[in-house]
Amino acid sequence: MIDIFDQNALVFAQIDGHIGRIVLNRPDKRNAMLVDMWRRVVMAVHALDAAHEVRVIIVCSSNEAAFCAGADLAELEAIAKDPEKRERNRLAIRDAQRSLARSAKPTIAQISGSCVGGGCGLAIHCDFRFAAQGARLGITPAKIGLVYPLNDTKQLMDLVGVANAKSMLFTARLVDTEEALSLGLVDRCIAPEQLETEVLAFADHMASLSQYSLYGIKQTMQRILDGQVDDDTQSERMFLDAHDGVDAQEGVQAFLEKRKPVFSWSPSDD
C-alpha cells in the first residue's frame, strides 16, 4: 500500500485545513521527474480530491531552487530502446497532467526557480500559476530532439496564443517571469519572499466561496476547452440542480440575513 502522505517520498501530499498540497521532493535533481513521480502526482490529486476538507490544491516544490527541471533524462535514455517502457512513460506523464487539469478542485502551481519541459507541462495544466521573480519557464523539446504531445502543445497555445507558443517552442528559449506574465504563461509575478503568502491568500479566498460553484465552473470551462460549444443534458442539469443545492440555499439565506455564507458542499459529496 503506497502512502501518498509520506513526506520522505519523491512526491507527496499534505493537508492543512482547506488547503491541499502536492509537493515535488527531489531537490538534489531539481525535481527531475521519474515515471514513478508522475504516477504519484496522479495518486496525490485523487487523494486530495477525495478529502472532504480540501478545497484548493497547490502544487509546489520542497526546495525554492527549482519547481521542476522536467523529465529525468537519464531515465529517458534508459527506456529509449524499449517501446513498452516508452509508452508507459508517455501515459504516466499524460495522466499526471490531465489529473491536474481535470481535478475537481482549483489547482495552483507555486513556481520558483526552474520550471522547464515536463515541469512547465505540469504548471500549465494547473488552473493558476504564481511565479517568484527570478523563475524561468520553458518547454524545450527542440534542445534534445523530442516532440511534445499534442495535449501539452494545445495547453500552451490556449494560454499564450499561437504566435507566442511558436516563439517559445521553435526557439526552445526560457522566459523570465516578467515576460511569462506578459505572455499569459503565469498569472502573477511575485517577490520570492512573498510567493507563499500570496498563493495562500488567493487559495484561502477561493476556499471561502461555494465549492459547488467552483466545481461547476471548472467542469464547464473544461468542456469548452475540449471543444463543446453548446449545452448538453449534463450541463443543463448542473445549472438547474444548483438552485436547490445546499450551497445555493445557504448563499441566498446569508444574503438575506446580511451575513457571510458558510458553504458546506464538497466534490467528494457528489
Image (tube, helix red, strand yellow):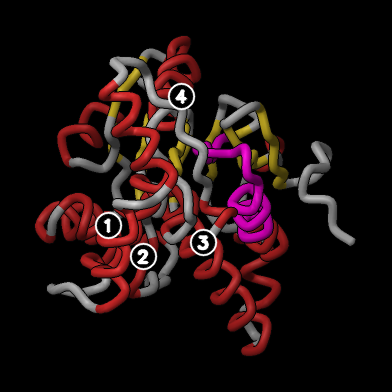
What is the spatial separation of the Cα atoms under label 3 and label 1, in whole angstroms? 17 Å
Look at the numbered disc 1 and give the secondary structure of its residue: helix
Picture layout, residue 151 above or below residue 181: below
Identify the residue shown where x is 46% and y is 64%. 98
Look at the numbered disc 4 and give the secondary structure of its residue: helix
What is the spatial separation of the Cα atoms under label 1 and label 4, in whole angstroms? 27 Å
Q: Which mark is residue 254?
A: none
Look at the numbered disc 3 and give the secondary structure of its residue: helix
N-terminal label among 3 and 2:
3
Query: Residue 99 at x, y = what percent?
Result: 51, 61
Write the start and end of the magenta stretch as one range: 41-60
Total number of numbered labels?
A: 4
- Crowdedness near tag 2: few (<14), some (14–19) or many (≥20) residues, C-alpha within 10 Å: many
Look at the numbered disc 2 and give the secondary structure of its residue: helix
- Crowdedness near tag 1: few (<14), some (14–19) or many (≥20) residues, C-alpha within 10 Å: many
What is the spatial separation of the Cα atoms under label 3 and label 2, in whole angstroms? 13 Å
Label 2 belongs to which residue?
Answer: 152
Residue 30 visible to an observer of this rendering: no
CB of mark 2 within 8 Å of CB of mark 4? Answer: no
In this view, the mark in front (2 or 4): 4
Amino acid type indicated by mark 4:
Asp
Label 1 belongs to which residue?
Answer: 156
What is the spatial separation of the Cα atoms under label 1 and label 2, in whole angstroms? 6 Å
In this view, the mark in front (3 or 2): 3
Horizontal arrangement in the rendering, residue 78 relative to residue 157 (left or right)? right
N-terminal label among 3 and 1:
3
CB of mark 1 within 8 Å of CB of mark 2? Answer: yes
N-terminal label among 4 and 3:
3
What is the spatial separation of the Cα atoms under label 2 and label 4, in whole angstroms? 29 Å
Label 4 belongs to which residue?
Answer: 204
Identify the residue shown where x is 29% and y is 27%. 188
Picture quadrant where residue 182 is located:
top left
